[in-house]
Image: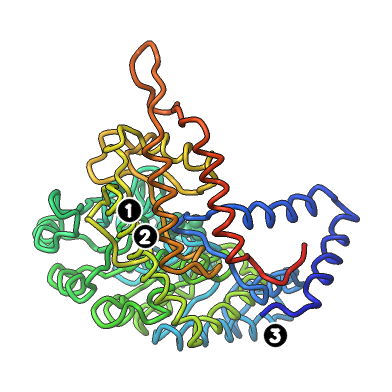
Amino acid sequence: MIPEAASSVYAQILDIVASVEPRIAEATRKELADQRASLKLIASENYASLPILLAMGTWLSDKYAEGTVGHRFYAGCANIDTVESVAAEHAEALFGADHAYVQPHSGIDANLVAYWAILAHRIESPALKRLEAATVNDLAEDDWETLRREFNAQKVMGMSLDAGGHLTHGFRHNISGKMFEQHSYGTNPVTGLIDYDALRAAAREFKPLIIVAGYSAYPRRINFRIMREIADEVGATLFVDMAHFAGLVAGKVFTGEENPVPYADVVASTTHKSLRGPRGGFVLATKEYAPAVDKGCPMVLGGPLGHVMAAKAVAFAEARTVAFQEYAVKVAENAKALAEGLLKRGVRLVTGGTDNHLLLLDVSGFALTGRQAESALLESGVVTNRNSIPRDPNGAWYTSGIRIGTPALTTRGFDEADFDQVADLITEVLKNTTPASTPKGPSKAKYVLADGVADRVKARAQELLADSPLYPGLQL
Ligand code: PLP
């Protein structure tokens, strides 16, 4: 519930901002209006609560606090210590983890912390120990060389990008692809599901130091018990990137073998996707990996953002409530309803459906690229993002897929019937879009949307959105 006073408080806050730079106040107001008016189906986005947003707008931002709780490289960090320990305490209780490190500024940063911690913990390096213990005067050049040799080209195995993995799981456009020797696992060409037997065989052959489990665009659950078994068999550390589905773990939709925390050595995540917190990241670790994880700052992170850690604490506290569990259940139920709605209207879904919060539509059946579908949907007020599908003939730029998810609209209050309507709107746009022709043949980017469709879909989307207002009661 939003207290009545919130509207005037926000209006005053924006006036204060406007007194220095009106364009920023204006962009902030406009962003709210835009978010309110769009059918947000981006699987990685959500709407944080006002307590979370407000916790970020304070002077906690003004404090430097490199180091860890009680062990800072700056004086006067008592309040940041409180903030960080409260956030960590909530995260540990929420996920049942031995240890939580809540400083990472984003998901990529959390993954970097995890990678460094695993390397530092796993590589028995006398050179590293000597260097860490050395004073500036006795740093040995040989030790640096040994260290670089030992740490370089360690092996990581993660899900391939077109099967739904993330760039940080060893791909060439991310530093993980440059610092590791990478081998990716894909999905079964027929079912689209992770093939654990193939993964096991590949791991036996490749012998990775790290197995990464997790995804950005895989519409199914992962069995982490099997992942653990495979990691143990080849002596790998199991690192789970649960950035996308942390909300479903927190909300106890993923339990037992689908909950990564009891099985993984290290788990990294964002806070802003299905978990519905502020933009940020965190890492969970077993007792064994905790000391290495805590070296994240200054090893790979800049000073912690006190104001964002405060908002993370509020978000973790929210996620411990029954209301959040109900929300998470609804996210998954709504995704199923959306999948059913699309399937019955003839849209092909990678893996034939979903059992998490996201769906991957294969739009090649409409003779469209993902880029064309994304643009035609956006023109009709439906916000999605294009995404590769497994073995995508159109590559990572044009793609053949559209990724959509239910976390954001579920926060607004959409139910299964609403998502059936959303399926209808998406199908209407896809069926009425054709590739534009060029002298060289059909375009991969330009498209033609039949007359009147965008306006019709937009109007119907507005009706749905009006029934589930964003930040109801907040008049801005
Ligand atoms: N890990 C996964 C699985 C993701 O999907 C993403 C973001 O899309 C990230 C990490 C990176 O998160 P951030 O954008 O906060 O750095």
Marks 1/2: CA–CA distance: 6 Å
Residues 108 and 274: in front is 274
In terms of secondary structure, where does tag 3 sit? Answer: helix
Residues 47 and 86: in front is 47
Category of crowding for the residue at label 1, using alpha-carbon neighbours closer than 10 angstroms: few (below 14), some (14–19), many (at least 20): many
Tags 1 and 2 in contact by the CB under 8 Å rule?
A: yes
Q: Check the image and tell me how it is coloured.
A: rainbow
Category of crowding for the residue at label 3, using alpha-carbon neighbours closer than 10 angstroms: few (below 14), some (14–19), many (at least 20): few
**Label 2 CB, ligand 1: below 8 Å?**
no
* Residue at x-position 79% and y-position 70%: 7
Which residue is most to the right?
19
Q: Position of residue 352 (x, y in %)?
A: 22, 56
Q: Position of residue 271 (x, y in %)?
A: 51, 69
Marks 3/1: CA–CA distance: 53 Å
The quadrant where residue 355 appears: bottom left
Q: Position of residue 95 (x, y in %)?
A: 41, 83
Which residue is most to the top?
439
For ligand 1, the image quadrant comes to bottom left
Q: Amino acid at mark 2?
A: Leu
Q: Which residue is identified by label 2? A: 338
* Residue at x-position 52% and y-position 35%: 452
Category of crowding for the residue at label 2, using alpha-carbon neighbours closer than 10 angstroms: few (below 14), some (14–19), many (at least 20): many
Q: Which residue is identified by label 3? A: 78
Image quadrant where one finds the N terminus: bottom right
- Left or right: residue 339 versus residue 464 is left
Q: Which residue is identified by label 1? A: 342
Q: Give the answer, above or below, for where 48 lies relative to 188.
A: below
* Residue at x-position 20% and y-position 52%: 186
Q: Position of residue 321 (x, y in %)?
A: 51, 87
